[in-house]
């Protein structure tokens, strides 16, 4: 949604009122930032609230985990407002981002008072997330769908489903006490061990396909997408920190997977067991894969607390991206990186259109819809080849995964540069 026309301030109060208004704006920014909003949206929302209530002389500096606010009342001597808030890193809850984003626009359109805005923000902050058992099942179901998407059989998807359930139960309970780095290392190792046990018990035919599907819930979709958007908006510090966080998470997953492979190989003498699947594409397989991408994307929309009314759009975005990627790979013969570039550009265009149609941030659809294109298989095979001392193959696989990641970055940046008038004439902000 594009920036709206600035309306006349609703009221001009005393410094005490100004402090209350800026504190309310900071609360809105706090909720947005800790739940997965990009920096430009946080700053725009805070400025909307302050400007509407007549506080003009205020400044905001937002980082990936902190908000700095200063303000001064005009025609007053030495009367100022300054506050710093640390925003802890937590899992994204996109329903709150949507709610605060809409509230900032309702302030001007509905004439809400400062106290009413504060009450609404408190209600949003206290809004319950999805039940724990919903999240655990969504992780398992999403893992199963992505296992099939990346070449697994229905039996492999069953093994990946079990691993995804146990992984998310670990993340929600004992994993909460661990640092983020060790949590991802332990998660990658746990998934690899569970899939190995499934394979040895006859649940699934391909150990590798089960692991590839089951590690997808660990993929840092929010910091990766928001880091790209922040850098594109000129917020280089916050964007670099978020991308560094995403790269560190990818690395930790790879370390966990690789370490567990190394332990299993050393203890059981299992060498050279795994090989990339060779999938012979046909129309029916592509249809089933698109269905898996649709359902898997919806599963991750649930994990990120996207409201139910957006599930269909999220699923369409994810399946459309996979369809375009697959058609280019199998019917044109172009590289995976170029196919990823085109598919990402297409789904971001679709995300911007859905953002206008549904009146919500485009980030909601981009974060969930990009999962089918994330090179999770590249992380897995690079880790495995390093453990097998196949350094040349590991270098090639890792380089291809990096190229696909760069393609995603370039496509997102390019499409968000497309002028808003190509999507709608209404003056809203995406």
Image (spheres, grey):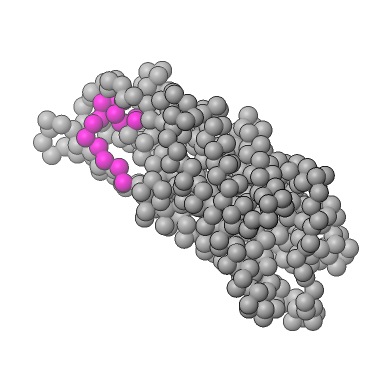
Does residue 199 appear left or right of residue 114 in this picture? right
Q: How many marks?
A: 0
Residue 394 in the image: above or below residue 206: below
49 and 238: which is toward the camera: 238
Residue 116 in the image: above or below residue 416: above
Does residue 185 appear left or right of residue 288 in this picture? left
Q: Position of residue 331 (x, y in %)?
A: 72, 50
Q: Position of residue 67 (x, y in %)?
A: 35, 46
Residue 158 in the image: above or below residue 324: below
Q: Quadrant of the N terminus?
A: top left
Give the residue at x 60% y 46%.
343
Give the residue at x 80% y 45%.
283
Residue farthest toward the front in the current orientation of the protein: 332
Give the residue at x 72% y 52%.
330
Is residue 354 among what the camera can see? Answer: yes
Residue farthest toward the top in the current orientation of the protein: 110
Does residue 399 appear left or right of residue 430 in this picture? right
Is residue 86 among what the camera can see? Answer: no
47 and 183: which is toward the camera: 47
Give the residue at x 79% y 57%.
279
Q: Which residues are magenta?
A: 48-61
Q: Position of residue 412 (x, y in %)?
A: 50, 47
Q: Position of residue 394 (x, y in %)?
A: 63, 73
Examine the image and state in which quarter residue 174 appears. Answer: bottom right
Q: Is residue 30 magenta?
A: no
């Amino acid at each position: 949604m594009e920036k709206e026309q600035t309306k006349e301030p609703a009221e001009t109060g005393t410094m005490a009122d100004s402090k209350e208004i800026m504190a309310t704006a900071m609360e809105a920014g706090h909720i947005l930032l800790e739940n997965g909003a990009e920096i430009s949206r946080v700053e725009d929302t805070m400025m909307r609230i302050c400007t509407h209530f007549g506080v003009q002389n205020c400044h905001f500096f937002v980082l990936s985990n902190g908000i700095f606010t200063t303000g001064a009342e005009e025609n007053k001597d030495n009367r100022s407002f300054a506050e710093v808030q640390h925003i802890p890193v937590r899992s994204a809850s996109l329903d709150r981002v949507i709610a605060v984003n809409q509230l900032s626009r309702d302030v001007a359109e509905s004439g809400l008072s400062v106290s009413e805005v504060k009450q609404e923000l408190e209600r949003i902050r206290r809004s319950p997330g999805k039940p724990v058992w919903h999240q655990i099942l969504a992780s398992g179901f999403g893992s199963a769908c992505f296992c099939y998407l990346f070449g697994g059989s229905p039996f492999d998807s069953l093994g990946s489903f079990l691993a995804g359930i146990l992984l998310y139960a670990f993340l929600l309970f004992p994993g909460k006490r661990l640092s983020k780095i060790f949590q991802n290392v332990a998660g990658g190792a746990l998934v690899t061990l569970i899939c190995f046990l499934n394979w040895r018990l006859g649940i699934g035919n391909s150990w590798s396909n089960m692991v590839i599907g089951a590690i997808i819930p660990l993929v840092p979709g929010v910091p990766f997408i928001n880091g790209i958007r922040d850098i594109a908006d000129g917020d280089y510090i916050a964007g670099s920190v978020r991308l560094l966080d995403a790269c560190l998470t990818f690395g930790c997953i790879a370390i966990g997977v690789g370490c567990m492979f190394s332990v299993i190989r050393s203890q059981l003498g299992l060498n050279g067991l795994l090989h990339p699947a060779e999938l012979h594409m046909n129309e029916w397989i592509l249809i089933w894969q698109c269905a898996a991408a649709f359902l898997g994307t919806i599963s991750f929309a649930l994990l990120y607390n996207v409201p139910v009314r957006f599930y269909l759009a999220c699923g369409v975005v994810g399946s459309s991206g996979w369809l375009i990627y697959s058609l280019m790979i199998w019917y044109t013969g172009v590289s995976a990186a170029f196919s990823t570039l085109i598919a990402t550009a297409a789904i971001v265009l679709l995300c911007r259109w859905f953002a206008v149609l549904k009146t919500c941030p485009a980030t909601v659809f981009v974060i969930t819809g990009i999962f089918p294109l994330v090179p999770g298989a590249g992380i897995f095979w690079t880790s495995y080849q390093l453990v097998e001392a196949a350094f040349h193959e590991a270098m090639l696989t890792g380089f291809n995964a990096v190229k696909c990641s760069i393609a995603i970055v370039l496509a997102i940046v390019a499409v968000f540069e497309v002028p808003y008038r190509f999507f709608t004439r209404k003056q809203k902000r995406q």
